Amino acid sequence: MMTRRLSRAKAAWFVAAALVGGVALMTNGIAGQSGLPSTANGEWPYYTADARGTRYSPLDQITAANFNTLEVAWRFKTDNLGSRPEFKLEGTPLMVGGTLYATAGTRRAVIALDAKSGELRWVHTYPEGTRGANAPRQLSGRGLSYWTDGKGDNRILYVTPGYRLIALNAKTGQPIQTFGTHGVVDLKVGVVFGTEQPIDLETGEIGLHSTPTIVRDVVLIGSSMKEGMTVTTHNNTKGLARAFDVRTGKVLWTFNTIPRPGEVGNDTWLNNSWAINGNTGVWSQITADEELGLVYLPVESPTSDYYGGKRPGSNLFGESLVCVDLKTGKRKWHFQLVHHPIWDHDVSSAPILLDVTIDGRLRKVVALPSKQSFLYVFDRVTGEPIWPINETPVPPGDVPGEWYAPTQPIPSKPAAYGRPGLRIPEEVIDYTPEMRAQALENLKHYKWWPGNKFLYSGTLYNPPIVGDVKGLLGAVNLGNASGGTNWPGGGADPQTGIVYAQANLASFATESVAPPPAGFSDIPYQAGVVGAPFRLREAAGAGTYADVPRRREAPAPRAQPAAGAEQPLQNFSTVDGLSIVKPPYGVLAAIDLKRGDLLFQVPHGDTPDVVRNHPKLKGLTIPKTGQGGSVGLVVTKTLVILGDPQITTTAERGRGSMLRAYDKVTGKEVGAVLMPAPQSGSPMTYMVDGKQYVVVAVSGGNYSGEYIAFGLPDAPAAPRSLSSQQQ
Amino acid sequence: MNSRALSVVAMVSTVMAIARATEGQEGRTVADPPARPRTVWSGVFTTGQADRGGAVYARNCANCHGGGLEGADMSPALAGAAFMANWNDLTLGDLFERIRISMPADRPGTLSRQEQADVIAYVLRANQFPVGTTELPTETPALRALKFLTVQP
């Protein structure tokens, strides 16, 4: 077999041959690593770096001193992995043994690339036809998982858009014939709706964007449904989390996120409503403590996102963090972040597992970033909150048939790292007094709660109203659907116990429901406004799977408003084209778990064009505002690295988005390089043959998906100015 | 340059050279000025075209991007700050090609070139770019000659 003595030229020949087929089994030996893959030897073996969700790598070749000299080492365009290009590439690759693995393209192909050159080693695709076209979660997904027995059986596992779990030989890309049926496990088998009715394998609604999590030879898989704002039935597919044997694909256990009769939590679905409701999936990344044998499930909202009248009760385990036993799937503890969820908070982020000394005691904690911008911190063995989380009164609601929880749990510590709600008027736009005045005028079109009766002017857990174009248009919220930290999650330094997360502070949302068009749904209220046209809300990329037919016929007419009765909804959420919310629009925050304190909170992202170029702001000195949006990060020995979520155009560097490095102790920005498009997938880092790389997925606007690898120049180079780094 | 001169420039590109020469005499760089590209500020679509585009938009785009082009949780807004930033410094040809190859998301390729150009006219008007007296072209090279600039040059 190949050894480290093999010359480079010969190695290159073998790699080339691997593409033609047959001898690829040798490529893994190039890096010459032994033992299990680990960030400790420069690899990135999990979507979140490790099974603990830290996104941490101890690499330190790329530093504050040289970040500005980073250059593109290689790039991989994903356009042809599928029948059409993708404009929303969200993946984070893995790197093990000198090979980079990723999902990409509108067919969610799996690619293996040479980690030094980006050269394609193999590609795997699994055409799914109409099953793929029907998938609720399409496009390339977030990534995949690696497993090895340490003796040469090395596997890549991923979930297809059509919800199949596939195991591939990591060296060849060929399916593992002894896994499932010729390498494939049909994840739709065993998925139910109602009272255990199986879903249809072709059209049944379930999928997954996140990656499997593999620990101790156990493959953990979550579930995801369509966007839940406008849905046709409350009796949707029931969410679940399952474990599979990594060798055989056999199911080991199932955890019902909607508890069945006799299971803990079933009584939180009043009137037996567990039987007629669904969703409550586990769409964000699952993490696990391999030593303790504990799994942490981030569970999302039940049906539907903004109306829960068909599910009275607090609805466990909706919007809960659930800890289950790795071997049995039995619930150990749970904590519900939002009772009776009706705001689309989900549990958006991978739980982060850390061992931290707090008040003189070494604590095993799980820390959970959130759309609310609270970091929820628990003892991960017992589920006890590290600092008190207090049930606090929240605003009441009056939508007919809705059930309301009178209180919600609010962490006393750490302080929010973003904006859970909008303090009115303190956090309303104030570039000029006129803008502030206009904003307060605009806010009269929406429901909020002046005074101190409720937190954040009553805009945290402010229940949706029946919006009406002739009255109030919605209930103001800030830290819900797209606020705070979304699916990219956060990261942490396991040595220091500091958690890092980017947060969107400007996601001004006005939640409202209205009766949908006749015959659309068995749910009487859906996201919408009375008197405005009904709009079906679909997930990004819905209908863009590679096998969706390129139909040429005219589209079927959608539900049309009654003639002349409806007008497009007026938008009062901006003032002179600017966000009604005052900057910062987005931040990078660091939370020190040793003390439960916010260590820093700095604006992240260049000031948007609309602010810099605004005629009414000419002459004003405006500090960097940061950007709204949601981006993930990587933590290294000394840096936190993340890209801008938006595109901007400046005189100095032209059009683009910056990939930035922050000093992870002070929060000071210490370097930045230009990317051609916003960061759309979280970055990762690795080292091969003594060179550190940072890989990031970019896409959006006119720019189709691309993985870009940055590295330091191979020859020593003098630091360059920003403007010289344009690509 | 006065406003009358501006509108002339908008309509007749050959006049642009003269306008530039005047500009140069006023003290700006005169040495071989680069040809100033036509932009979305030059009045590159008509009211009639934008109206037609509005009808196409309502049938094919509004469901995801919103009746007021405001976007939704998962679909980008087609009016306002984020949209302007996304396309700033590109061309209408880039925007046209993005639509042509990928939109409507669930059935790309179903709109004719004329319908696509009309939708772009509708979107430009919604973003308050000036209306002109000639329609947007439907061929990509001609659209590539029209620059999308957030700030009036």
Image (cartoon, rainbow, N blue to C red):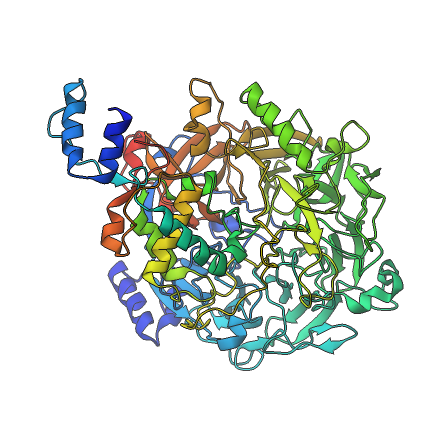
Relative image position of residue A561 (x, y in whole percent): 60, 59
Q: Residue furthest left?
A: B32
For residue A460, above or below residue A164: above
For residue A570, above or below residue B26: below
Residue at 67% across, 74% down: A251
Residue at 51% across, 55% down: B62
Front in this rendered view, residue A251 or A136:
A136
Relative image position of residue A501 (x, y in whole percent): 59, 40
Quadrant of the drawing holding the C terminus of chain B: top left
- Horizontally, residue A33 falls left or right of residue A596, namely left
- Horizontally, residue B106 falls left or right of residue A517, namely left
Quadrant of the drawing holding the N terminus of chain B: top left
Please identify the quarter of the rendering in which residue A378 is found.
top right
Front in this rendered view, residue A446 or A254:
A446
Q: Residue furthest front?
A: A564
For residue B5, above or below residue A253: above
Relative image position of residue B80 (x, y in whole percent): 47, 40
Please identify the quarter of the rendering in which residue A79 is found.
bottom left
Relative image position of residue A528 (x, y in whole percent): 65, 52
Please identify the quarter of the rendering in which residue A389 is found.
top right
Residue at 72% across, 44% down: A365
Whether residue A432 is visible to the viewer of this picture, yes or no, is yes
- Horizontally, residue A390 falls left or right of residue A456, namely right
Front in this rendered view, residue A460 or A391:
A460
Whether residue A607 is visible to the viewer of this picture, yes or no, is no
